[in-house]
Structure formats: structure tokens, C-alpha cells
Amino acid sequence: MGFFHSFMVVIPVFVPLLQGYGLSMSQVLQTQAMFALVIAVCEVPSGYIADIWGRRNAVLVGSALNGLGFFSLLWADTFVEFLVYEMILGVGFSLISGADLALLYDTEVYLQESGERGGAGAGKSLSRLISIEAAASGIAGIGASLLLLWSLDWVIWVQAVTGLAPFILGLLLVEVPRPDAGVKDHRGNARQIVELLLFSKPVVLWTAFAIAVFGLLAVHVFWIYQKYWDIQGVPLASFGYIWAAFALTVSLAARYASAIEQFLGTRRLLLLVALLPLAGLLGMAFGSGWTGVMFGFAIQVSRGLSMTLFYEALNSRVPGDFRATVNSLVSLGVRAIFIVSGPILGLALDIYGMVPTLFGLVIVFTPLMVVVLLPLLSRIRVEQADSAAQAAGTG
């Protein structure tokens, strides 16, 4: 399911597609702001619904809505119709977001605790899911370039058909038993979630902030790439191949993130995760042609490492009963800010151009990374010291 959720052949050429219908970059980013707005409204309620109603049910409904959204592309050709498309996808993705990670993580924990043979463990399975989703995005990129040999219409038709695959596969899902599932003390549940995030485990709070900052940077760069490639003179037929190479980079970085962390240590890995995207943005600003395009790989490496590192740190410290809700809250932080920052990014590209916009991202995100990573490192050291003291006391 993760593969087909990320197998979106329309994404590598989405900006040229919309601009072909006469939309400006500001309007393109406004469609994404609408997507973010719908998710911001639905994200937390949908995550909580998944915790109470069941993760499988939430994933199924979300997958059905996504399939409907992709079918709407077959007749969409105006700014308003693309807004409707993003609204449908926003509800669908908000239902899936958090629920899929929680379902996977809960299943692995259940298999380990019950002594049954299952997957590779919660942490490794999480990194594998991220890796598979990134690989699917890469394969979709290759598919998009091949389909462009015929026309953009072929891209849209294939997306409409493959968009139904997650719903069909979702019918095969089995949710592990959760004795407390369905508890309706909503006020008490909300109090527990707030206490968890703000007071009981500081590492959870700062990890959530880190996910929001790095995720927001990734979303901004995500929608810059295609415009950047066009400015650098890259032919449209090559967009999908570059997209595939970028996605493969994320996949490999996510797959081996745990091994890299063991080799470098958490502190050095966090420093690397922060420096890589800044170097990538500066390289894109100063570079030209394919040289500038190549610097985008640094941002993708950071993306793969940070997603695995931060989401594993978050989910391993969150109780299973509220895992989907907490994951949704984290995603909400990214989407809520992008509602405002997305259209501003589009205006900056239309008015000032690419290079000043890239410099602006560096200026904005450098202090944000420092603000979230320094407290996170401090809290991790405190947590490790407490664990060592408890282990010594027990021994």
C-alpha cells in the first residue's frame, strides 16, 4: 500500500501540467496551500478517529477518497477544478497520515510481544516503509518520463487507474487487537496527549518540532525543483528520470539511516542532516545547468536520513493508543505553516526569481534548525543519562 500511495506519476510533471493550463507559480502553490489547509483542518480529527474507530477503517476510507481525487484529474482543466482535486486528496491523505504508520508499528510490536514470527522489528520496518515509498516515487518518475513519449494525457490516465490500488490492497489489511480501542473518554484522551507532548517526554516535543522544520523545508524544495529544472534548461522528458534518481537517493538514505547513526553517532548525524540541505540550496543558487541540479541530491540524502531518524524517535516514545493522533499532530505542524508560506513562496518565485528565493530559504531555515536541534540534543543527553542511572540502580 505504501508503494502505491507514493506511486504518483503525475507529481514529477505536476508544475508543468498546471502551467500548461495557464496557472502561474503563485496559483500552483495556492493549490498546494489548499491541500495543506484541508489537511490542517482534518489531520488531527482523522488521526484521533483512526485511534478510536480503527486504523484499517481510516486507511480504507482515505484510500477510496484518493482514488476519487485522481479520477477527477481526467476532467480538471481550470484553477478551481484543481483546487477541488487538492481538497479531495487532502481529506484522503489526512485519514491515511498517521494511521498507516501506527498500524505498521503496532503490528510489529504485537508480533514481538506475542512471540509470533513477523517482520524485522518496529524500527527497521518503519525505515523500510519510508524506503519503499521513496522507491515508488522514483519508479513513478521513470514511468512519467516514458509516458511523456506519448502525451501528458497518458500520465493522467495511468494515475487515475493506479490510484485505486491502495484501496484494493487495503481490503486485505488485518488490524492487531487493541483492548483499549474505542474508548470514548475524549477529554481524558486529549489531556493525556497534551501531557505526553508537552510535559512527560521532552524528547517527543523537540522531535516533533524537528520533524516540522525539516518537513517544511522538504515541502518547499519539493515544489521548487520542477521550476528550477525548467530554468536550468532541462528538457521536460528528463524530469521523471531526475525525480527517480532523487527518490532513489531518499530511499537508500532511509534504508541505511540506522547503520549510519551507529557509525557516526546521533550528534554527528543530526549535524549532517542539518548541513546537507543548506549546502544543497546554496549549490543550487550558485550552480547552473546540471551542476545546480546535482546539488539537489544533498537535500534528498538529508530527507531520507531525517525522516527515519525522527519518526523512529517519535514513535518509539509514544504509546500505541495515541500513535496515529501524535503522528497526525506532527504532520499538522508542517501543513498549517505551508498554508501561508506556500503562496508566499510562489509569489517570491514569480516576482524575485529563483536565486533570491533559494537564498531566502537558507536565511529562514538556518536559525530554525539551530533552534530545534540544540534543545533536542540536550534532551537526548538527559534521557540517556537517566536511562543509564536507572540501569545502574537496577543492576
Image: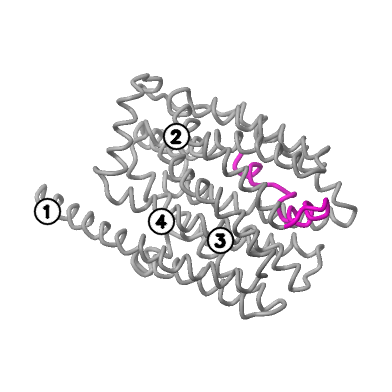
- What's the mark number on residue 130? none
- What's the mark number on residue 210? 4
- Of labels 3 and 2, earlier in sequence is 2
Mark 4 and mark 3: span between their CA atoms? Answer: 21 Å
Kindly identify the residue that appears in the image at 36 percent across and 23 percent down: 186
Res. 235 image quadrant: bottom right
Q: Does the CB distance between marks 1 and 3 fall below 8 Å? A: no
**Residue hosting label 3:** 252
Q: Quadrant of the N terminus?
A: top right
**Helix, strand or loop at disc 3?**
helix
- Residue type (three-letter) at the residue carrying disc 4: Ala
Mark 1 and mark 2: span between their CA atoms? Answer: 32 Å
Q: Position of residue 371 (x, y in %)?
A: 35, 63
Outermost front residue: 351
Mark 3 and mark 2: span between their CA atoms? Answer: 24 Å
In terms of depth relative to the viewer, which is nearer, 191 or 247?
A: 191
Mark 2 and mark 4: span between their CA atoms? Answer: 26 Å
Q: Position of residue 381 (x, y in %)?
A: 24, 60
Mark 1 and mark 3: span between their CA atoms? Answer: 37 Å
**Residue hosting label 2:** 107
- Of labels 2 and 4, earlier in sequence is 2
- Side (left or right) of 263 relative to 192: right
